[in-house]
Image (cartoon, coloured by chain):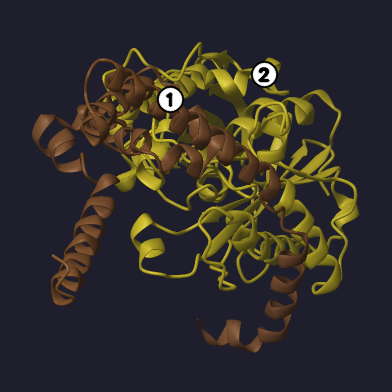
Amino acid sequence: MIAEQIGEASYRTAEAYIAETAACVGRKEGEGPLGQYFDVVWRDEGEAFSSFEKAEQALLAQTQDTALAKASRAWSDVDLVIGGDLMDQLIATDFEGRRHQRPLVGLFSACASFTEALAVGASTVGRKGPRTVLVAASSHHLTAERQFRFPLELGYQRTPTASWTATAAGAVLLVAEPTPVVVDAVTFGRVVDWGSKDANDMASAMAPAAVDTIQRHLDALGEAVEAYDAIVTGDLGVFGMKLAAHLAHTEYHFDLGTNLEDCGHLLYDIERQDVHNGGSGAGCAASVFSGYLYRHLRTGRWRRILLAATGALFSPTSSQQGESIPAIAHAVSFSRHGDSP
Amino acid sequence: MGAEVRGQAPRIQRYHAYADRIRPKPAVIHNVWWAFVVGGMIALLGQGITWGFQQAGLTGNRAATPTSIVLVGLGALFTGLGWYDRIVELGGMGGTLPITGFANAMVAPAMEYRAEGLIMGVGAKLFTLAGPVLVYGMATAFVMGAIRYGLGIG
């Protein structure tokens, strides 16, 4: 490992450059405000497949293929694939591995799986190898609904705090050779559980984890919030962003400022698309970063951003048994090469 | 919860107090109104069907059974067409509680779990939603029957 430990769980990464990214999404996500930033927008949720699980695998495969094609690389160039999804036993990530046949690290942090995979990938990749690491995460609205909630056609009212699992996948190709955008530091989150129990209000459970990780990342790097053009959390949504900003201000004594954004908030038009609190799912942060955030990093609107995706680590079983919801956030900071501190 | 969390107890309490204060609330008046409208429309439809059967010659309560059958059929049809979940999204309990909602709770898993096969998919999962209704419906009927018997009314 070429990364240097600079805090309890923070590492400065030396040779983790982004060669390309790709994002493929479902129809609803394509109709959202970020629609134009995605490489492929599906016309539907993949009804042509014999199951929606297969549709999610295909969406992930298409995203990975697109990232490699954009970077003019072949699968045989990939030394390591790292990724995760929301399905039990990671059946999107792992089953996709049957096709690409590259060494695979599958991991799970719910909706934070993407930054977890990025953090592992960025601290692993280097000139001594693995030199080319493909990081990806996916989610599908209908596979998540049936696993975590109810059958598609069952009528029920969603609460105002409920989030909408995105049909989306994002992939990032990390390489050891310099490119314009570099991953400069990562912080691995710890499990934070403040006792929230409502699975329809993941924002309350996840906001403390986001603030905890962001603070530890800033402390380790000796930076203030102002060092970043944008601090982007994952899947906190409208309500969770307010909670995180308030919590940071009152209990952690730093202001997340006006540059706070959130992937679940960015992905949809909250009112028009009836998504209540906003988007969620491993593919939400993955597609928002790979499509939208990376584009603005590369083209110069931003020089430096921090992405802290959050995950609610509950299962349907733990929820039914009355357990509270543990949450985690993993943070990754990016800068345009040459502008890094 | 671990020592870390216990040490933070006041901070956590303040956090939850704030979250409870600003958490978006369900629109109760709006929801109650639409539950009344949607539930009322379904009831009106049922009453209309009952009158229809009575006009056709079925007397009094004998029209109730075919009415239920027609409503269950309509609930299943609307579920299959992908409309019933929208009705409940608007009407809440007004759409869930009538017998059409029961049909929805049966047909939705039947459609959903086809991919897992007819035995362990549809067969095993068909009652995952309607099961609690049946279990506690029958249990309540049993208890009420026992009370009725005990009071010597039966």
Q: Are marks 1 and 2 on the same chain?
A: no
Q: Which chain is brown?
A: B
Calculate the distance from the C-alpha at mark 1 to the C-alpha at mark 2. 42 Å
Name the disc covering residue B45, or none.
1
- Residue bearing the label numbered 2: A35
Residue B122 x, y percent position in the rendering: 17, 34
Circle 1: element type: helix
Please tell me which residue is depicted at 40% across the width and 17% down the height of the picture.
A46
Position of A278 with respect to B120 (left or right) is: right
Q: Is residue B152 above or below residue B30?
A: below
Say what amino acid the circle numbered 1 marks.
Answer: Leu
Q: Nearer the viewer, residue A318 or A311?
A: A318
The residue lying furthest to the left in this view is B119
Query: Chain A takes which shade in the image?
Result: yellow
Q: Is residue A302 above or below residue B9?
A: above
Q: Chain of mark 1?
A: B
Position of B141 with respect to A321 (left or right) is: left
Please tell me which residue is depicted at 43% across the width and 18% down the height of the picture.
A74
Q: Is residue A56 above or below residue A158?
A: above
Residue A27 x, y percent position in the rendering: 55, 17
Q: Residues within 10 Å of mark 1 (few under 14, many from 20)?
A: some
Circle 2: element type: helix
Which of the 4 image quarters holds residue B16? bottom right
